[in-house]
Amino acid sequence: MEKQNYAIRSYCSIRDRSIRVNGNNFFDADPSAPLGDFLKSAYRKLGVDYPKFHKMDGLCKAIFIAAELITRESGPYEQHMALLFANRSSSYLSDNRHANDVFMPGNPVASPSTFVYTLPNIAMGEISIRHQLQSENVFFIFDSYLPEFLVPYANATLDSQRFERSALCGWTEVTEETCDLLLYRIGASGHLTHSIAQLKRLYNKEDE
Amino acid sequence: MRGEVYIVGDEVISPLGIGSESNFQRLLEGGTAIAPVTDSRLFDRTIHAARIDETQANDLVRETTRYTRLERLFILALQRLIDKHDIPLGKDTLVVLSTTKGNIGLLANPASTFPQQRANLNTMAEVIRRHFGFENPFIPISNACISGSLAMSVARRLLRYDSRYKRAIVVGGDELSKFIVSGFDAFQALADGPCRPFDRDRKGLNLGEAFAAVYLSKTPVRGAVKLMGAGSFNDANHISGPSRTGEGLYLSIREAMREAGDITPDFISAHGTATLYNDEMEAIAFQRCSLSAVPLHSLKGYFGHTLGASGLIETVMAIHSLKNNELIPSLGFAHQGTSHALNIITQPTKRPLNTFLKTASGFGGCNIATIIQKM
Amino acid sequence: MSELTQELKAKIIVQLNLEDLTIADLDDHTPLFGDGLGLDSIDALELIVMLDKSYGIKLSDPKEGRKVFETIQTMADFIEANRT
């Protein structure tokens, strides 16, 4: 593999009930706060007027918030910035809700607004609409955050881009009560090297 | 100059049968897999759908009780491909697996005999990997209805840019379930009869199930086809409705064609789900790319919408079309139904064919276009 | 404001996740789609499910739906005329 020279421009982590941008604290809530409340409070702190936020499921809300914070920190997103996300549970939050709806004894009723979120890439659609990103989206499912795969794949993606060399990548694992999210924007320049070692450091909170 | 990537093998399992060649023959005969399905485990009403009769497949897979129905069918497709081409399972072989929902039929289902954990896509992939003993963990992709084509383009990129891999298997599949059927019904997306892609009277899609695999290599063999170009762009318009201007698909087709050297394809295998909006959007995108006159079909009238398998099974059939120099008609079409006319294939047609364009679009606003050419 | 329009407003706010709105914010005659409340196609499908689940009315024709869901008032009128 050729040596790659991409960098991390900005990153956001949402761990349990704590949100950090580039290693600095943005918002903290009580660890016992329900996920929905936590994300809603974070949204309010963002001060953004985007009513569609409330229709999203937990996975989409968390990704929305992180994407918002990263662009605030590092400038507008390029229109063709690739989105390369991964998680373990896919769209479990909405899958579970929809599955329980349809197997409800007595009166099973499917909700279209729940069903639409039963695909993990919908979150990419949501931020594409918000930031007007017309770009490639790939959602991978791994057992755990795998920079060993994502780093070379992201590098290959940027190498193959004809337009701006940029991508938003990361691990977005959101379940009923846990949030384990690390999103990072990569491009030709930035303060941190886009490397497996660097991302392991960020993921393991060695920047705090 | 990155290396080329070739498709050197393929396999298909569908309600029309086991094996790519037999599926292709059935298409030429006009055989459809879509039929009325009445099964309270699936839905409280009869739906038109394409369902695999797995009793055909059961005898061909060893140790069936350890695997879910979906896993068995994935295993069968992979088994046949591996055996046919003697594919090594070591660390220079990549496997990319495409599915929208995997074992979702297990979730919250009181009749399930497997643990809920099996509904996790990675768990499922690992079960299949272990069956064969592949050295590398699979790379599962879940990206709505473009997953199949997308998985192929992901594999292609890795083969071109990552020297660790010499070859790749791309396999895709999804099965019918109450989860999926009830969801599409809540979307009012299901037609109450056989679907009619691009037709004036189309009223929605039929769901289907299928499993398909392709074998990619950096080394060509006789009879292989080449993956010439790929492009994928989101519409950035709406999470479940396609862009009214076909923006994302237009950009995807243009990029794929540019990468392929701007050759006009000999035919198009469209996504053509037979919903009002998808088919109209595709017609607009094709017109914007000056492709309205290119012979076109949707294969969803034969297989239904096979979700995670659709990009792959339809690509495989198009490859056989190329090799046999025979165009497959678009089943279910009678009258122009899109604001821009398309050149819909209505009869099996023998003519020299070298290149095709395959398109796919999905929930979340994603789109993908791929161009494949005979060597 | 009738009891039914009150009830509809409460149901809609919950069903469509209109978090930032209260019943008082919703006018009986504001267009629900397009320029008024700006609901979208998924919201329309949710309203169809709501009509069925809460009022026993099955709407099969999407064109009919557009007229029924024009405003809270048109919805209330339709429900009064057709509920089971």
Image: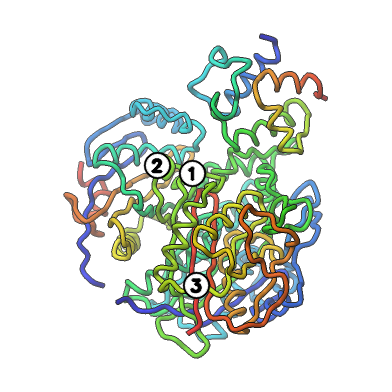
Q: Is residue A46 visible?
A: yes
**x%, y% of residue B137?**
43, 67
Could you tell me which residue is drawn at 64 percent across and 57 percent down?
A: B273
**x%, y% of residue A152?**
30, 64
Outermost residue toward the left in this view: A191
Q: Is residue B118 visible?
A: no
Residue flagged by tag 3: what amino acid is it?
A: Thr
**x%, y% of residue C50?**
69, 30
Q: For residue A197, which quarter of the picture? A: bottom left
Residue that label 2 marks: A63
Q: For residue C35, which quarter of the picture? A: top right
Mark 1 secondary-structure assignment? loop
Outermost residue toward the top in this view: C1
Residue flagged by tag 1: what amino acid is it?
A: Asn
Q: With A135 as the anchor, is B53 left or right in this view?
A: right
Chain at numbered mark 2: A
